[in-house]
Amino acid sequence: MEKVTYQYLGSKDYLETWDYQKSLLKEVIDRKLKNRHLTPDDPEHQQQKHYLLFCHHPPVYTLGKSGSMDNLLLNEAELTAASIDFYKINRGGDITFHGPGQVVGYPIFDMDRFFTDIHKYVRFLEEVIIRTLGEYDIIGTRIDGFTGVWIAGENGGPNRKICAIGVHLSRWVTMHGFAFNVNTDLKYFNYIVPCGINDEDKTVTSLAKELGKEVDIHQVMERLKHHFTQLFDFEFERV
C-alpha cells in the first residue's frame, strides 16, 4: 500500500505554495527517474513519496492555461485596491478564486503507483468532495461537460458550484488540485466569470451557505483526508 505524507500549511501565500508544490513535484519525479533503473532490492532504491497539502490562501484569482483574461472583471488598480492577488498558472481550467474559508487541496501523487488515467483522477477528486458533502446530508453531483462538484438546482433554481478542480501532470506526477468552498465569502466571485462559465442557470455556493451556518473547517479536512485514503487506497505516513 502506498504511503502519503500529509501537510497542513495553514494560511499560505499562493505564490509561496505554488513554489513549494513545484519543489515537491521535482523531488517525486527525481526519485521516480532514479528508481526506474534500479530493482526494489537495490540498496539505492527508495520508496516513492507522495504528498497531500491542505491550506487556505489570502484572496487570489488564478487563471489556468486555457483561460481567458476576459473572465477577470477587475483591472490591475481595482485588484490592488481590493487586496486581491492575480496569477496566470499552468493548471487546466479557466479562472477561479482562492481565499479564506476554503479548503484548497494539492495532491502531489505519482500516478504510476495508482493508475494512469487523468479523467479517472479528476473523477476521484470530485468523488472525495461528493462523499464529504454526503456527511453533511448534502447531495453533490457532476454536470456533463463541466469539471468540479455541484449542487443541483431546485424548483428551477441554478445549479450551484461548490468545488472547483484544476490539475497539472508531469511524468504522471500531479500538482494543483481543488478549491472547496466551506466558509468562503462568495462576494469575490462577483468580480470574475467563475471557471469561464457565464450561464444563468449556474452559480457558486459554499458549505456554510447550504447549511445556513459556519462549519468547522478542521472537521471538513479530516473528512476529506478519510475519503482520499478510501478512494486512492493509501495510508498516511506518520511524520
Image: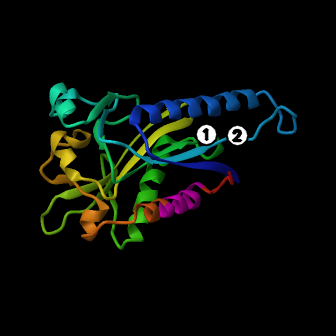
Q: Tell me residue 218's x, y (percent).
A: 45, 61
- Seen at 44% across and 43% down, the residue is 177
Q: What stretch is highlighted in magenta?
A: 222-232
Disc 2, SS: loop
Q: Tell me residue 148's x, y (percent).
A: 35, 50
Q: In which quarter of the image is residue 196?
A: top left
Q: Nearer the viewer, residue 125 or 221?
A: 221
Instruction: Report whether 197 appears left or right of 18.
Output: left
Residue type marked 2: Gln
How far, Cα to Cα, is label 1 from label 2?
8 Å
What is the residue that sits farthest to the bottom in this orientation? 137
Disc 1, SS: loop
Which of the two labelled residues, at mark 1 and mark 2, occupies the earlier sequence position?
2
Q: Are marks 1 and 2 in contact (CB under 8 Å)?
A: yes
Residue type marked 1: Asp
Question: Is residue 66 visible to us here?
Answer: no
- Seen at 12% across and 50% down, the residue is 200
Picture layout, residue 160 above or below residue 23: below
Q: Residue 110 carries which label?
A: 1
* Residue designated by label 2: 48
